[in-house]
């Protein structure tokens, strides 16, 4: 019923069953502009679904992403995976244990937005300051279909908003309000001490 035929190269990093590093779609690919399909109840528990989630986690870790959304690996489903642990791309971020969000619905709990620096595996080499809600309510399902219902703030809230945007066809630079705060990573590193103080947007 559901076919999972992404380009694969088998990895032997895990012993349990073969997992794969998936090819990441880059900005401009039509799949990153689509609204992804809601995962239906009967997709949970299938080997195709579990394999996709495992491969997404493996791909996120391989490329040191803080999160990855299914459309980024050419699968137009409302699934994202999030994890921050000793991440070289985000050395100062708090750890986030592995979180699988399926069919997420986000409600802001504040009107306050703050700017934070974001990058994306689909926009390699770029970093930009994006305004995001500082506190959100998240309803979703986990990878077994069980309901999730929680409040997130800080870096976790930023990552969840970034990944959920992917499920609705949006990449982070489309959220930027000041394009002068878009950098290549190398220049961002080189000139970071000269960067403007990131203001709070009320
Ligand atoms: Zn992204």
Image: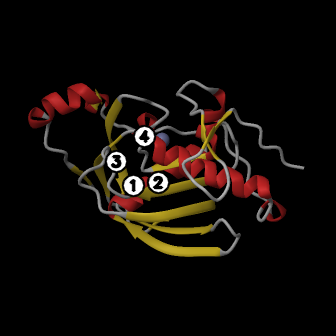
Q: Is residue 44 above or below residue 170?
A: below
Q: Which of marks 3 and 4 is nearer the N terminus?
A: 3
Residue 161 got which mark? 2
**Residue where numbered disc 1 is placed:** 158
**Residue 125 sits in which quadrant?**
top left
Q: Earlier in the sequence, mark 2 or mark 3?
A: 3
Residue 29, image x, y percentages: 61, 26
Tag 2 and tag 1, C-beta contact below 8 Å: yes
Residue 63, image x, y percentages: 45, 40
Q: Which of marks 4 and 1 is nearer the N terminus?
A: 1
Q: Which of marks 3 and 1 is in front?
A: 1
> Is disc 1 placed on a helix, strand or loop?
helix
**How many other residues sit within 10 Å of disc 3, few (<14), some (14-19) or many (≥20)?**
many
Q: Which of marks 4 and 2 is nearer the N terminus?
A: 2
- Does ligand 1 reach within 8 Å of label 4's beta carbon? no
Q: Nearer the viewer, mark 4 or mark 1?
A: 1
**How many other residues sit within 10 Å of disc 2, few (<14), some (14-19) or many (≥20)?**
some
C-alpha gap between disc 3 and disc 1: 9 Å
C-alpha gap between disc 4 and disc 1: 12 Å
Residue 190, image x, y percentages: 15, 28
C-alpha gap between disc 2 and disc 3: 10 Å
C-alpha gap between disc 4 and disc 2: 11 Å
Q: Is residue 78 visible?
A: no
Q: Earlier in the sequence, mark 3 or mark 1?
A: 3
Residue 131 got which mark? 3
C-alpha gap between disc 2 and disc 1: 5 Å
Q: Where is the C terminus found, in terms of image quarters? A: bottom left
């Amino acid at each position: 019923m559901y076919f999972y035929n992404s380009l694969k190269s088998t990895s032997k990093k895990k012993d349990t069953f073969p997992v794969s590093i998936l090819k990441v779609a880059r900005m401009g690919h039509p799949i990153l502009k689509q609204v992804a399909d809601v995962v239906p109840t009967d997709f949970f528990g299938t080997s195709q679904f579990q394999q996709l989630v495992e491969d997404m986690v493996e791909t996120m870790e391989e490329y040191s992403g803080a999160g990855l959304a299914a459309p980024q690996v050419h699968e137009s489903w409302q699934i994202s995976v999030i994890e921050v642990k000793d991440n070289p791309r985000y050395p100062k971020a708090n750890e986030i244990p592995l979180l699988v969000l399926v069919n997420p619905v986000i409600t802001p709990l504040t009107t306050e937005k703050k700017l934070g620096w974001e990058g994306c595996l689909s926009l390699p080499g770029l970093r930009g300051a994006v305004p995001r809600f500082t506190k959100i309510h998240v309803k979703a399902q986990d990878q077994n279909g069980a309901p999730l219902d929680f409040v997130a703030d800080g870096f976790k809230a930023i990552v969840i908003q970034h990944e959920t945007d992917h499920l609705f066809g949006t990449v982070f630079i489309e959220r930027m309000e000041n394009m002068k705060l878009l950098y290549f990573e190398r220049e961002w590193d080189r000139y970071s001490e000269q960067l403007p103080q990131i203001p709070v947007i009320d």
